[in-house]
Image (cartoon, rainbow, N blue to C red):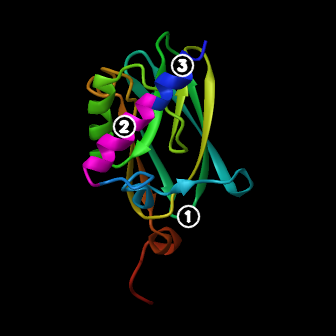
Amino acid sequence: MKLKPLIAAMATTLLASTAFAAGEHAGGHSDSDAIGKAGKAANVKRTVTVDMTDAMRFKPASITVKQGETIKFIVKNSGKLKHEMVLGSEKELKEHNEVMKKNPEMEHADDNQVTVAPGKKGEMIWQFTKAGKVNFACLQPGHYDAGMKGAVTVSSKTMANDGHAGHKH
């Protein structure tokens, strides 16, 4: 049956046109430069395992990385519900959450996210290119509102080196 590809195409078109109308997207996430970019397996510096639970929590919910570091996330779903890990700015995640409420069956296929069926694992490779905070959340309907979110703190290259950025000894 060819209904699924048609529905996926319609959902993608709807999301893209909604986002474009808001003036934020032109073929990608508006804040994607701020959160980094898809990483390459050859550049992975370390692996971080993240567990998603039906208590609507990520474990860990707080992750620290260095600017420029490429991380391989192994994302486990230890619950009985479908969960996902989506990287983005807080603003993007809130907006996307609202879209998901209106389109609960929408499927994702972006580099900054992984959807995982109950009892399964998925992976995502991401390079954190800028210092600051990158949020992550589960955008399955109701999960974000229940508190299923976390953050990656990206330390700057200079601060990561000696903790004395901006001055010499």
Q: Residue at x 41, y 78 (%)?
A: 165
Q: Position of residue 64 (x, y in %)?
A: 47, 51
Residue located beneath label 3 in the image: 4
Q: Nearer the viewer, mark 2 or mark 1?
A: 2
Q: Which one is in front in this view, the residue at disc 1 or the one at disc 3?
A: 3
Range of magenta residues: 10-23
Q: Is residue 13 shown in magenta?
A: yes
Instruction: Quadrant for residue 123, please give it.
Output: top right
> Is the Cβ of the residue at disc 2 closer than 8 Å to that at disc 3?
no
Measured from the top left, where is residue 60 in percent x and y?
A: 46, 35
Q: Quadrant of residue 92?
A: top left
Q: Identify the image quadrant of the N terminus.
A: top right
Amino acid type, label 3: Lys
* Residue at the disc numbered 2: 15
Q: Is residue 75 left or right of residue 97?
A: right
Nearer to the camera, 5 or 120? 5
What residue do we see at 62% from left, 53% from top? 39
Task: Residue under label 1, please give it.
Answer: 68
Q: Which quadrant is home to the C terminus?
A: bottom left
Are circles 1 and 3 on residues that touch, CB within 8 Å? Answer: no
Image position of 33 with respect to 9: above or below: below
Residue shown at 65% from the left, 49% from the top: 46
Q: Assess whether residue 79 is covered by the magenta stretch.
A: no
Which callout, 1 or 3, points at the residue further toward the start of the chain? 3
Q: Position of residue 50 (x, y in %)?
A: 53, 33
Residue 84, horizontal then vertical, whole percent: 47, 28
Q: Which badge, 2 or 3, is on the more N-terminal residue?
A: 3
Disc 3 element: helix
Q: CA distance from mark 1 to mark 3?
A: 38 Å
Measure the alpha-carbon separation of dots 2 and 1. 30 Å
State the SS at label 2: helix
At label 3, counting other C-alpha atoms closer than 10 Å, the crowd grade (few under 14, some 14-19, many 20 or more) is few
